[in-house]
Image (cartoon, helix red, strand yellow):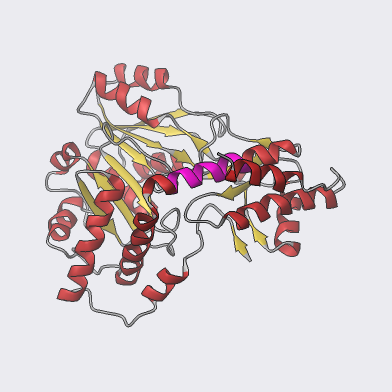
Amino acid sequence: MLLFTPGPTPVLENVRAAMAKETIHHRTPEFTEIFKSTRELLFNLLKTDEVLMFASTGTGAMEACVTNLCHKKALTINAGKFGERFSKICSAFNIPFKELTYEWDTPADVGEVVEAVKNDSSIDALFVQICESSGGLRHPIEDIAREVKAIRPEIMIVADGITAVGVEPIDVTNIDALITGSQKALMLPPGLSIVGLSSRAIEKIGKGKGFYFNMASELKKQREGTTAYTAATTLIIGLKEMLNNIFELGLDTLYDLTDRRATATRVALEAIGLKIYPKKPANAMTAVIDEDAEKIRKILKSKYEVNIAGGQEHLKGKLFRINHMGIIKAYEAAWVVNAIELAMSELGRIEYTGKANKIFNELYFGE
C-alpha cells in the first residue's frame, strides 16, 4: 500500500533500520553525542538561532509556544482545523485572543492582520500556519511577519511549519518560533516535535512557563546535550538518520523535487477535470474538491493500493488530499495520478487515456 496521506508519511528503510538498533539510555555519553549531532543538523535545516525538541506531537510544540511566548493577548489566524487549534489552546489556558477567521480555501489577508495589530496594543504574539493542511492552503507568512514587525517588532511571530518545514525554503528573518513535527516531511513516526527560536523569542521566554513544556528549562538542558525529561531516543536517532538523508540529497534539490511533484500533480489532475481546492495551494499537498471524493479514495485504496486523505468537518466527503512531503519516488507519485484517472473512469466520468500520467511525467522530468 502506498501511503500518500499528508502525515504520517512513510519511513525510509535506512531510517527504520537505525531506529531498530539496540535501545540506549538517554543519560549516557553515547546518546548525548547523538543528540548534539541531531541539533546541529536541525540548525542547518531551520536556520534559526536556537532549536528545541519535545517528546510530543506538533500540538505539544504549539502549546509550548502559546504558553511561553504570549504574555498578554494572542492574535490567531483560523483558516482550518490547525489555525482553530491555536485559538483552542489559548482558551484552555485562559489567554485572551483575537481570532481572524477565513474560509478553508482562503489565505489570510495581510492588511486585515496589520489592522488588527494596529487596533489592539495588547497583542504581543501572532499565531499562524504556513501551510494549513485542512485544505492544503499556503498563508503569506513572510509578508505577514514583515508587515507586523515593521509596526511592532516586539510582537512574537509564531509560525506552524509542521507541513512546511522540509517542503520549501522559509524565510525566518521575521519569524520568532518555527514549529515542525516528525511525521511530515521529516518522514518519521509521530511523537517528536521541534521548535526553532529567534534570539528575540529566547529573551521573551525568560524563566519560562509551565512544567513539561517549559521552554527555559528545556533550552538549558538541550544546550548541554540532554533533555529536561526523558528523551524520545528512538525518534531522535531516526531524525539524525533522516536529516543525513536530506543533506546528502541537498536542501535545494529536495525543495525543487517537491515543487515539481506538487506542480505536476495539480496540472495533471486539472487536465482530467478535477478542481484544486485552495486559492493559494501549498506544496505540501494537493487538495481536490469533488463530489466523488470518498468514492475515489475508496477505489484507490481497495483496487490500486494507494492511501490518500479525505476532508474534515464541513469538507468531509468532499475533499481528498495527496501528500508531496518528503523524499518520494517519482514513479510512486505518477502512479497516484494515474490511479485517480482510472478511478474516475470506473465511476463513468471520463474515458481513461493515461493523460494524467503523461502530463505528470512531462512536467516532472521536463526542464
Is residue 42 found left or right of 98 in the rendered image?
left
Between 272 and 220, the one nearer to me in the picture? 272
Is residue 248 found left or right of 205 in the rendered image?
right
Corner quadrant of residue 213: bottom left
Quadrant where the C terminus is found in the figure:
top right
Q: Position of residue 29 (x, y in %)?
A: 15, 74
Most extreme residue toward the bottom is: 22
Most extreme residue toward the front is: 367
Quadrant where the N terminus is found in the figure:
bottom right
Corner quadrant of residue 100: top left
Please determine whether, in this image, residue 231 is positioned above or below residue 168: below
Q: Is residue 96 magenta?
A: no
How many numbered callouts? 0
Is residue 278 found left or right of 213 in the rendered image?
right
Please determine whether, in this image, residue 130 is positioned above or below residue 119: below
Q: Which residues are magenta?
A: 254-265
- Measuring 42% from the left and 38% from the top, which residue is drawn there? 130
Asked whether residue 289 is in view, the answer is no
Between 71 and 80, the one nearer to me in the picture? 80
Q: Position of residue 155 (x, y in %)?
A: 24, 29
Is residue 252 found left or right of 365 in the rendered image?
left
Q: Is residue 261 magenta?
A: yes
- Measuring 26% from the left and 46% from the top, which residue is drawn there? 196
Q: Position of residue 346 (x, y in %)?
A: 84, 52
Task: Give the overall secondary structure of the magenta segment.
Answer: helix
Q: Position of residue 211 (x, y in %)?
A: 21, 57
Asked whether residue 11 is in view, the answer is yes
